[in-house]
Image (spheres, helix red, strand yellow):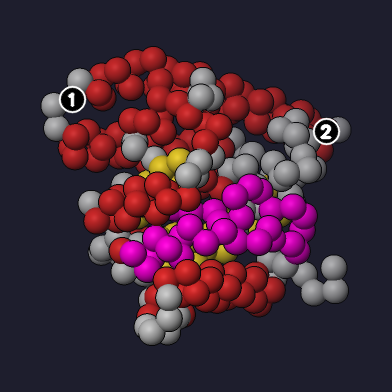
Amino acid sequence: MTARLDYCWRFYATGMAFVVFGVCGVLFSVVVFPLAWVWPHRASRQFAVTSVIHWFFRALVAVLQRIGVMELEVSGMHALRADGPAIVVANHPTYLDVMVLLSLTPHACCVVKNAHWSNPCFWGIVRSAEYVSNADPAELVEAGAKQLAAGYTMIIFPEGSRSPAPNRLHAFSRGFAHMALKAGAPIVPVLMDCDPPAFTKQMRWYDVPARAFRIRVNVLEPLGVDQLAAHDIPPALAARSVTSAVEAHITQHLFDYGFFKTGN
């Protein structure tokens, strides 16, 4: 009986969290977005908006932990808050990965799906924060390099979508590699895991697991692009080399940390 009540509570709390998130997103779009665009200074406007987003997601994560819906375990967080811009590259097992990384990373900029620019819950947020659309690969690299030059951390999920299944990743796209080569920024690999699985590509929001899910975040040491590609090769080959190296690095560490299971 107790287990049943616990499940019902988490089901209700999860649904309410999605409602609150959606309502806040709409309010941000219709209230904060117009105010942001009359802000006279573009740089300070973006700084303020990214601060609001960071603290909102930080509060939301704290509430979800407090009410027993989720647990969060983070290792190596100092690398997300190191001085200087960097490109955070993470695997993408669950819908909540973006929320978690934004809650951990002050003044971050994300590469987001082009569909979010017309989503009623997100359009004001992505525009006010000057996030980068993935619609055009060349523009993505240029816009990302500009954000890095302005001092923002870029958060990128190079799979482009949530991982297809346990122990599997989509092939990494090369946008982050071109961006790193253009800006000379370090790449910070991040391992994400959710146990038991929740909000995966195969699940709906109402597929609440039998117990509170634990999201684990392991931030690895930064990688310099000079470590991953030779200096005397064309940019396209260098980007391919960087992408392959980072994908292999993340995949190996997912097994090493036990996030992926051998034999599955």
Task: State the residue position of label 2.
Answer: 4
Residue 205 vs 143, above or below: the answer is above
> Of residues 25 and 118, which is closer to you in this image?
118
Image point (34%, 36%), residue name: 129
Residue 148 visible at all: yes
Of mark 1 and mark 2, the one earlier in the sequence is: 2
Residue 166 occupies quadrant = bottom right
Q: Residue at x 75, y 34 (%)?
A: 204
| Residue assigned mark 1 | 39
Q: Is residue 197 left or right of residue 253?
A: right
Q: In this picture, is 52 found above or below 81? A: above
Image x and y of residue 120, in percent: 51, 20
Q: Nearer the viewer, residue 26 or 65?
A: 26
- Where is the N terminus found, in terms of image quarters? top right
Which callout, 1 or 2, points to the residue nearer the camera? 1
Q: Residue at x 46, y 65 (%)?
A: 177
Q: Residue furthest left?
A: 40
Residue situated in front as seen by the camera: 52 or 158: 158
> The magenta stretch spans which residues?
155-182
Query: In the image, residue 31 lies at what x, y percent?
Result: 34, 15
**Quadrant for the C terminus in the image:** bottom right
Q: Is residue 127 above or below residue 171?
A: above
Please give the label number shown on residue 68.
Answer: none
Label 1 element class: loop
Q: Amino acid at mark 2?
A: Arg
